[in-house]
Amino acid sequence: MQPKGAFHITVILHNVLASAEIGRLLGYLHKSRRGWAFTGAGVSTPSGIPDFRGPDGLWRKYDPERVSTIEAFEKRPEEFFSFWMHRFELMRKAEPNEVHRMLARLEELGYLKGVITQNIDGLHRKAGSKTVLEIHGNAWTGTCRGCGRKYELEWMAERVREEGVARCGCGALVKPDVVLFGEQLTPAFDRAWEEVRRCDLLFVLGSSLQVWPAAELVPLAARNGATVIIANRDPTPYDDLADLVIRGELAELARKVLRCLEKEGT
Ligand code: NAD
């Protein structure tokens, strides 16, 4: 068994190292002029929205090929809607957490130009981020596949509750405005690509970096000489490219950063 004293030393060392990491993170942010955040599902797990590949991730319970592809939407719309509308309801009720707030504050203070997100939950905007590039779309609206008419999430949810699918007056299905596997990315991805090509810092948070082509933004930033910071609980395939890897709970990291920013401001 570890002696009690040794445990205390470990905790103290851990705290000192953690503060050193925050110091380096803030140092990089201070130096950058064109910094962007790049976020994934891990920034929203503290808001109660499960990620895909974490320990409670959805892919441990569902087969993505069955529920998240454009083929699934077209061939098995009832199953698609029953899975997704439940998740959208969760997103509708969720509130932003410290991580979203930290990123909004970093933008407000001029440390970041904005957030590029793979998330579809809209929580960055709800937290006050102004420039948000939603490269996988968002869950708040849907578009008719036949006539192109736009619908709100509320409307889709009601249709699904009553009929099992969301169908437009013209008879065609209404697809939520999220990018499914097998679909083209949104025009926001082209903008994100351009911004990352020119950025001098990319702060990656809460992504396994396993979804393509989104993950490609990280090697792109590194190739162009930007500082790359990866904050995630689990290792990612691009940790070796990063100037700084911060392993651990994002909400805790965000609380510490927010405290430092508060002190700076006083
Ligand atoms: P992912 O599930 O593949 O990876 C999430 C990563 O975040 C994991 O590596 C996990 O270790 C880490 N993580 C989770 N909670 C954390 C926490 N509290 N602190 C630190 N790290 C934490 O997610 P991804 O890389 O974003 O790719 C999945 C795709 O699924 C994305 O394209 C996204 O559009 C979509 N998605 C979106 C949402 C959402 O909008 N909230 C939720 C799930 C999935």
Image: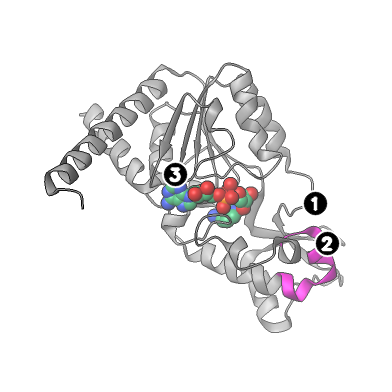
Q: Residues within 10 Å of mark 2 (few under 14, many from 20)?
A: some
Residue 141 image point, x, y percent: 66, 59
Q: Nearer the viewer, residue 63 or 25?
A: 63
Residue drawn 15% across and 48% down?
3
Discs 3/1, front: 1
Discs 3/2, front: 2
Q: Circle 2 — which element? A: helix
Residue drawn 67% across and 25% down?
194
Gap in Å between the C-alphas at discs 1 and 2? 8 Å
Q: Nearer the viewer, residue 185 or 56?
A: 56
* Image quadrant in which you'd find residue 211: top right
> Horizontal placement of 194 versus 184: left or right?
left
Tell me, yes or no, if residue 181 can be seen here. yes
Residue wearing tag 3: 128
Gap in Å between the C-alphas at discs 3 and 2? 35 Å
Q: Which is nearer the N-term, disc 1 or disc 2?
A: 2
Amino acid under disc 1: Gly
Tell me, yes or no, if residue 127 can be seen here. no
Residue wearing tag 1: 182
Name the mark on residue 71.
2
Q: For the C terminus, give its image quadrant.
A: top left
Gap in Å between the C-alphas at discs 3 and 1? 31 Å
The magenta span reads: 68-80
The secondary structure that most of the magenta stretch takes on is helix
